[in-house]
Amino acid sequence: MKELAGKTAFVTGAASGIGLGIATALAQAGVKVMLCDIEAEALAKAVEELKRTNADVEGVRADVSLKAELRAAADATIARYGKVHILVNNAGVGGAGPYGAWTDGGWNWTIGVNLMAVVWGIEIFGPLLEQHGEGGHIVSTASIAGLISRDSTPYKVTKYGVVALSEGLRFELAPRGIGVSVLCPGFVRTQILDSGRNLPPRFGAVFNDTPVPERFQQAFKTMKDRHSHGIDPAYVGELVREGVENDWPYIFTDPEFEPMIEARFAAIKEGFDRIRGREPRR
C-alpha cells in the first residue's frame, strides 16, 4: 500500500479525534474516504469540512456495536466507491469502572464497541479487501493500555484483545497481500473520557452505585487533564498514514510509556527465569 492515491478507506469513529485525524491524513494523500460515526451531526460537519479541501469523502452513520449497521455501512461504501483497500477500526469508548464497579451493561457496551466492532469490521471488510487483488491494509486502534495494565477496567481488557487479534491477523493475512497494524496511542486530545454521550439506551446502566475508590477518582482527573493537553489527533493521523505506507506492525504516538512496557517484558522474562532448568513432568 505504498501508493495510496486513488485507493479507498473506511474509517470508524471518524467524526472527531483520532478517527478524523486518520481520515484527514488519508484524504490528503489522495485516498477516497468513507467516514463512519455514531454522531450524525458531528459526522456531517466533518465530511463538509473535508470536502472543502477537495477531498473525495462521504459519511455514513452507524452504531458499530451493531453488526447489521456495520454491514450496511460496508454496503454503502461499496455502492459509493466500488472497492475498499484500507479498513480503519478506530471507534472506541472509555467504558465502565474497575472491579467492584462492574456492571453487565458496562461490559457489554465496552466489549461491543472496542472489541466486537473490530472483529465484525474485519469479518465484513476482509473479503472486500481481498477480492479486488490490489492489496490492502487493516489498522485497528487499541491503546498503550493494550500492552500495559494497572487496573481491571473493561477498557484495558478490550484493548489487549485488539492487540492480540491484530498480531495474529498480521501473520494470517500477509500471504493474501493485506497488511495489519495496531495503533497504540498514548494521551491524545480526544473525547474518549466523554464516551457516555453516545451510550445507546439498550445497554442500560453501565455504572452502579458502588463508590469509586479515591485512587481511581484521582486517576480519572489526571487522565482527563492529560487528554485535554494531549497529542494532536492530526499528528496521529499522519503516523497512521506512514504506518500503512510502510506496513508497520505497531504504531505508537510517543515513547512515554516505553519504560513501563520494558518493565512488563522484564517481569515476563523473570517468570521464565524462575523455572529455567526444570524438567516439566509429563
Image (tube, grey):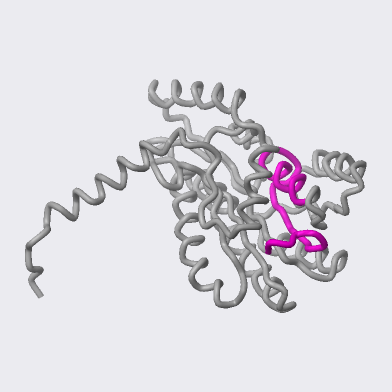
In what quadrant of the picture does the C terminus appear? bottom left
Residue 44, position as x, y percentages in the image = 86, 43
Any part of residue 206 in sight: no
Left or right of 237, for residue 119: left
Residue 192, position as x, y percentages in the image = 61, 36
Any part of residue 127 in sight: yes
Instruction: Give the camera-side residue of 70 and 189.
Output: 189
| Total number of numbered discs in the rendering | 0
Residue 209, position as x, y percentages in the image = 47, 30
Extent of the magenta region: 1-26
| Residue 79 is covered by the magenta coloring | no
Q: Residue at x 82, y 62 (%)?
A: 6
Residue 17 falls in image quadrant? top right
Instruction: Give the camera-side residue of 217 and 238.
Output: 238
Left or right of 270, for residue 9: right
In what quadrant of the picture does the N terminus appear? bottom right
Instruction: Give the camera-side residue of 89 and 175.
Output: 175
Above or below, 219 relative to 234: above
Above or below, 115 relative to 187: below
Q: Residue at x 74, y 58 (%)?
A: 10
Q: Residue at x 67, y 76 (%)?
A: 130
Q: Residue at x 80, y 56 (%)?
A: 31
Residue 281 falls in image quadrant? bottom left
Residue 22, position as x, y percentages in the image = 70, 46
